[in-house]
Amino acid sequence: MELSAVREQLAAARGREYWRSLEDLAGTPEFQEMVEREFPRQAIGWSDDESPSEGRRNFLKLMGASLALGGLAACTRQPTEHIMPYVRQPEELIPGRPLFFATAHTVNGVAVGVLAESHEGRPTKLEGNPEHPASLGALDAMGQAAVLQLYDPDRSQAVMLNGEIEAWGKFSGVMRDQLAQQKAKNGAGIRILTETVTSPTLAAQIKAVQQAFPGAKWHQWDPAGPHSARAGAVTALGAPTNTYYDFSKANVIVSLDSDFLASGPASLRYARQFARRRNPESEGGMNRLYVVEPMPTATGTKADHRLALRAGDVQEFAFALAVSLGIAQGPRQGDNNDIYK
């Protein structure tokens, strides 16, 4: 793929055209062949020389053989294991009956309340906590899959040093020696790197470390965090502030390149509140959703009216909307005047 050929193709294009990758844009024969072979309907085309009926028969033969081999593998006799009872069984634990615990998992540093189902001390399922304001009893796919982190085979099982397992006591000794050396420097060589932290307990612990080592620095970074929203809050409010909305009271909603129904720590609550007002018989009437976005999103599929607009023009559209509502006066110099029409 050559960028010069891609630029020529884009220059000759007329109208809007959406593509998911540079390979899709280039439209090379290799990419087209991969697309043709990607979907299940191509499973019948084992050979260009076969007729459709022969292809289907071969497909059913292979599937039947796979099922038979899978059944035989499931009949393998497992080695005998002994089940040992508890020497001192916990009072609240009954074998075969799950326990539920109220806990939370974080999304961009914000806690989302969940209920964890546990069998004999092993968490097996997560569901939203109906009494938590961030989830309202719902949970997205990322939250459902969060329990698998506890069973990740690549998760560290012990203290590691240069790829070798070491004792916890050795780690504590090394840390004490290093901290003793940093004490004379007021912690000038200490750096703490975390994701966004909103936990008061963890924040207080880090602050205690900073008080003991005034020269230490704490850095927070999320590789896919809401950095633009945070920068906008600093510009508008002077501080990195999280803004939360109450969609249960909104009659008209305008979403400017914001997938608020499917992304972000408050999306579960927003989706619940938005859905309650989609009933024409709801108190206050049915809400209306207008979406302006450069690419399709889950929020865009729920819109009453959706406008596909380039990402660079969304800001100008917002200013034009403010002008039409009397909030701002314009147009501004250098703006795209077509947006105001």
Image (spheres, rainbow, N blue to C red):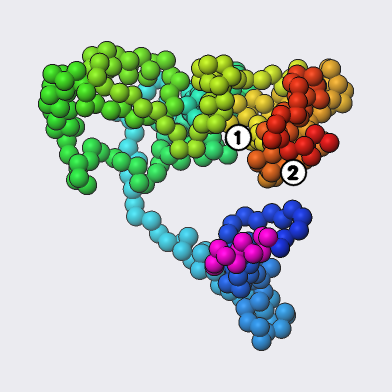
Give, as a single range, the part of the protein colored magenta.
1-11
- In depth, the one of 37 and 131 nearer the eye is 37
- In depth, the one of 5 and 19 nearer the eye is 5
The numbered disc on residue 263 is: 1
**Label 2: few (<14), some or many (≥20) within 10 Å?**
some
Q: Determine whether the residue tagged by mark 1 lies in a helix, strand or loop.
A: loop
Locate the C terminus by quadrant.
top right
User: Is residue 2 covered in magenta?
Assistant: yes
Mark 1 to mark 2: distance in Å? 19 Å
Q: How far from the left and from the top, in percent, is residue 186?
A: 19, 18
Q: Quadrant of residue 314?
A: top right
Q: Residue at x 64, y 64 (%)?
A: 8
Q: Quadrant of residue 29?
A: bottom right
Q: How far from the left and from the top, in percent, is residue 43?
A: 64, 71
Q: How far from the left and from the top, in percent, is residue 223?
A: 45, 38
Residue annotated with mark 2: 308
Q: Residue at x 50, y 24 (%)?
A: 111
> Given the image, on which type of amino acid does mark 2 rest?
Ala
Above or below, 192 against 152 in this view is above
Q: Residue at x 17, y 35 (%)?
A: 167
> Given the image, on which type of amino acid does mark 1 rest?
Ser
Instruction: Between label 1 and label 2, give the one nearer the viewer.
Output: 2
Above or below, 320 against 214 in this view is below
Q: How far from the left and from the top, in percent, is residue 124?
A: 48, 36
